[in-house]
Image (cartoon, rainbow, N blue to C red):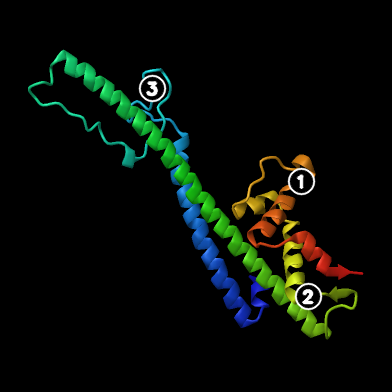
């Protein structure tokens, strides 16, 4: 908060507005994540708490309410006790249970994608925010120092240096901070590439920039 108080009023408003948008989106992501976690838990008996099993003895997986309808195939009351009808209904009910399991798997995939899309949006908001702050820092430095440092040769617009500043800052973030904005690395340091390395690559992908080409345009002698 002390750092925020030192900024200009216009920058404070920009920081607060962007932070609120990101926090609102983060709250939605976490809420959906909590709901999604049900897909990873087996169904248990409401009274005993025991895990329910299917006909093959496997634990029954979570099925969302939208997929829990009973089998719509119903006989008339006059034929309900017929042996042949019972056999037919058993097959229909088994097929319906299979359908529910299939639909639950689709629902799980949709739920995962809903979260992934929002995580990508959150990262882009964060990247844009970092770019804005980097741009502000560079402009401030330019104004207060009477121009850019003599050893930096600007071959194109300031945006090149802005991207490099944001990109460089991301390369210092820890795995915990990266996870906070919806970015995870399955194996830290695998293949000599750390989470922060992968995060900077994601920045380049999301922001649609070519880092190699951008570096070549901002030379430091």
Please, is residue 51 above or below residue 122 in the view?
above
User: In the image, what residue occupies the spot 38% across and 27% down?
Assistant: 49
Which quarter of the rendering shows the N terminus? bottom right
User: CA–CA distance between discs 3 and 1?
Assistant: 43 Å
* Label 1 CA crowd tier, 10 Å (few <14, some 14–19, many 20+): few
Task: Identify the residue position indicated by label 1 in the image.
Answer: 193
- Earlier along the polypeptide chain: callout 3 or callout 1? 3
* Label 3 CA crowd tier, 10 Å (few <14, some 14–19, many 20+): some
User: In the image, what residue occupies the spot 64% across and 47% down?
Assistant: 184
User: CA–CA distance between discs 3 and 2?
Assistant: 65 Å
Task: Identify the residue position indicated by label 2 in the image.
Answer: 156
Secondary element at image label 1 = loop
Relative depth, front residue between 11 and 153: 153
Please, is residue 148 above or below residue 52 in the view?
below
- Earlier along the polypeptide chain: callout 3 or callout 2? 3
Instruction: Determine which of the numbered discs, if any, sits on residue 53 in the image.
Output: 3
Secondary element at image label 3 = loop
* Label 2 CA crowd tier, 10 Å (few <14, some 14–19, many 20+): few
Secondary element at image label 2 = loop
* Front disc: 3 or 2: 2
* Front disc: 3 or 1: 1
User: In the image, what residue occupies the spot 50% across and 50% down?
Assistant: 115
């Amino acid at each position: 908060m002390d750092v925020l108080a030192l900024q200009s009023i216009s920058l404070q408003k920009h920081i607060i507005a962007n932070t609120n948008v990101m926090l609102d989106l983060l709250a939605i992501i976490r809420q959906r994540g909590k709901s999604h976690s049900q897909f990873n838990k087996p169904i248990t008996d409401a009274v005993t708490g025991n895990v329910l099993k299917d006909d093959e003895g496997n634990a029954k997986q979570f099925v969302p309410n939208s997929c829990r309808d009973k089998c719509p195939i119903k006989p008339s009351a006059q034929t309900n006790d017929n042996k042949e009808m019972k056999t037919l209904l058993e097959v229909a009910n088994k097929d319906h249970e299979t359908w529910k399991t299939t639909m639950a798997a689709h629902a799980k995939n949709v739920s995962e994608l809903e979260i992934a899309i929002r995580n990508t949006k959150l990262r882009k908001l964060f990247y844009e925010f970092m770019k804005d702050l980097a741009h502000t820092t560079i402009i401030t430095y330019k104004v207060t120092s009477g121009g850019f440092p003599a050893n930096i040769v600007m071959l194109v617009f300031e945006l090149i240096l802005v991207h490099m500043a944001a990109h460089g800052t991301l390369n210092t973030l820890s795995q915990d901070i990266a996870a906070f904005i919806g970015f995870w690395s399955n194996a830290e340091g695998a293949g000599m590439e750390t989470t922060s390395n992968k995060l900077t690559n994601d920045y380049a992908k999301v922001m649609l920039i070519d880092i190699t080409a951008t570096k070549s345009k901002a030379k430091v002698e």
